[in-house]
Image (tube, grey):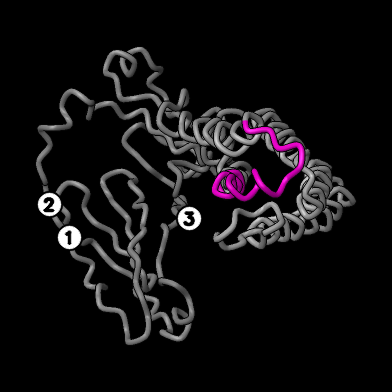
Amino acid sequence: MIGTETSGRPRFGWLLSSYAGLALLAGLALVVLGGWLAVLGGSPYYLLMGVAVGAAAVMLFRGDGRAVWLLGAAVLATWLWSLWEVGLHGWALIPRLAWLIVACLLLAALWPIARRRLSLFNPAVFGAVSLALPLLLLATILYPLFYSPDVELADPALAARRPAGAISRVAVATPDGNVGGQHGAGDWTAYAGSNLGNHYSPAAQITPANVDSLQKAWEFHTGDGSPPDGISYAFQNSPLMVGRTLYVCTPSQIVIALDAATGREKWRFNPHTDPQAMAGVAASTCRGAAFFARSAP
């Protein structure tokens, strides 16, 4: 038998061609959408990345092994650009780097085919692009997620040195002095802690040293656990804590106020949500309520 394939083995060159086709589609999408973003004044990077990915796809179709060099350069450039744009922010790095990790690992799976099909095939370069680079990208995502420099564990010594004032009073100037924009350590007045959206509380009574001795103080059931037929519920609520009252909302948008010390229900508001309004989605949920304090007239 004459050819580059080993006799008796099936020909899998179509897998490499399919990979090149997917890369070409991705490149075209990046060129079109990235070009439109650039026209609107956004970053031109997506357009440039689309050109590089598309060119590498054409080279793969032609059996040119230099496509691997071009893909590697594009991935490395994206890694550097991502760090420049968002820094070591794990969640922000995921949409920028995760798809490239998948693309590189798929290329690694095609190693035996690429070795036979591509001219100028370099095993060291192929291994670096398809294995070493995705490991670098994965480590770049995971490190800030598990070892974030922005996470501060509760430390009584640090809490004692902090100013006693409300954490948001200076940063958020609300014309009406609304509590959602300024609160103390014992409150959680908005979905992300305060109107700053900083996901932070200076409360330090519970620490890594005493968390294992916590005991359940009370338990409360909302009574909204049985969705109508054809509707799914997901309880993803972030309760609000204002003073001695805890505010929760349920998947059908019922808002309940509880005594934070005892769990006793103070009041509830049921908007009687139309079941049809909750249908057609993966799950009906309420992420959280909003709080506004109004002075008596």
Q: Position of residue 196 (x, y in %)?
A: 53, 39
Along the horizontal axis of the image, is 155 left or right of 31? left
Type of amino acid at the residue the image marks with label 3? Pro
Which residue corresponds to the image point at 23% horizontal and 67% vertical from the top-left? Answer: 222
Which residue corresponds to the image point at 48% horizontal and 80% vertical from the top-left? Answer: 280
User: Sequence-wise, which precedes: disc 1 or disc 3?
Assistant: 1
Residue occupied by mark 1: 220
Magenta stretch holds residue 121:
yes
Magenta residues, start to end: 103-123
Type of amino acid at the residue the image marks with label 1? Phe
User: Sequence-wise, which precedes: disc 2 or disc 3?
Assistant: 2
Q: Position of residue 180 (x, y in %)?
A: 47, 44
Task: Give the vertical position of 250 relative to 205 (above or below).
Answer: below
Along the horizontal axis of the image, is 62 left or right of 23? right
Q: Main secondary structure of the magenta part?
A: helix
Residue occupied by mark 3: 297
Q: Are marks 1 and 2 in contact (CB under 8 Å)?
A: yes
Measure the alpha-carbon separation of dots 2 and 3.
36 Å
Q: Position of residue 10 (x, y in %)?
A: 57, 63
* Any part of residue 226 in sight: yes
Mark identifier at residue 85: none
Type of amino acid at the residue the image marks with label 2? Trp
- For the N terminus, the image quarter is bottom right
Residue occupied by mark 2: 218
Which residue corresponds to the image point at 26% horizontal and 65% vertical from the top-left? Answer: 267
**In terms of secondary structure, where does tag 2 sit?**
loop
